Amino acid sequence: MNKIHQSDNFFEDNGNHSFWQRKFGPTLGAVLAFFVEIVQIIIISAAIIIPIRYFLIQPFYVRGASMEPSFYDNEYLIIDEISYRFREPQRGEIVVFRYPLDTSEFFIKRVVAIPGDTIEISDQKIRIYNEDHLNGVLLDETSYLFEEPTPGHQKRTLNQDEYFVLGDNRDASLDSRSFGPITKQDMIGRVWIRGLPVSRIHVFDIPDYNL
């Protein structure tokens, strides 16, 4: 008849008193055995949670107004850190990244142009040129901007692994118009879920630009 035994340091599944009860008596031994089991649970939980926390998802709080009305100050976001290990960032995704001029700071912005695009900001509009749109096409941002104008005037072609990012609150955002494109390596991940406040819980998808 086969028997299953746990480590002698914990419990024996054979009807005898546990190691702790034999050594310290039934009362104290039971208490110690309980705490040992709790420690086991904590260690196992940490072994599962820590890799998820540091390699798969990461929480962030929004600070500032640069992404209004999409995000407001103190909103709680869950960032997907795994997707960009298997695919490239896409136009319209909202990303958290390290500020290129001070990597201790984290910024949240929206990707509006990707490698190979030429982005033109003119007349408070954004026009994208690429292989499929040689004459350019206006970027339709009405699903999240509510016709917010884009100040500035510049035209730039993005090289390999260059992404042009903008805040949704165009008048109050420090973004690629000032510090230039960012790279995939700069990115922590994409915004996946807004967890708080409860009234604004939302899972984010990619806007359809018809590009």
Image (spheres, grey):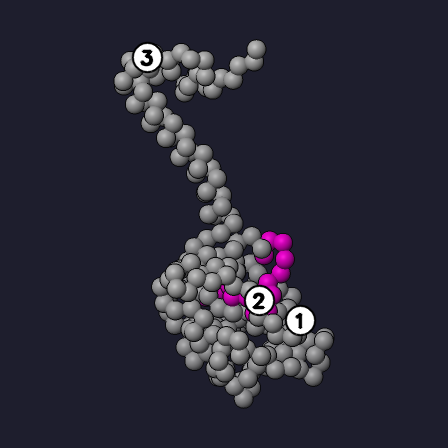
On screen, residue 80 above or below 200: above
For label 1, the residue is 116
Q: Type of residue at label 1? A: Gly
Indicate which disc, 3 or 2, sits on the residue closer to the N terminus: 3
For label 2, the residue is 206
Give x and y (percent) for residue 42.
40, 35
Magenta-drawn stretch contains 56? no
Give x and y (percent) for residue 113.
59, 72
Q: Which dot marks residue 52? A: none
- Nearer mark to the viewer, of 2 and 1: 2
Indicate which disc, 2 or 1, sits on the residue closer to the N terminus: 1
User: What kind of element bears circle 2?
Assistant: loop
Q: Name the residue rendered at 51%, 48% in the picture.
A: 55
> Quick check: marks 2 and 1 in contact, CB under 8 Å?
no
- Left or right side of 24 for 93: right
Indicate which disc, 1 or 3, sits on the residue closer to the N terminus: 3
**Image quarter hosting the C terminus:** bottom right
Report whether residue 2 is seen.
yes
Q: Type of residue at label 3? A: Lys
Local crowd size for mark 2, using a 10 Å CA cut-off: few (<14), some (14–19), many (≥20):
few
Highlighted magenta segment, given as a residue range: 84-101
- Left or right side of 134 for 208: left
For label 3, the residue is 23
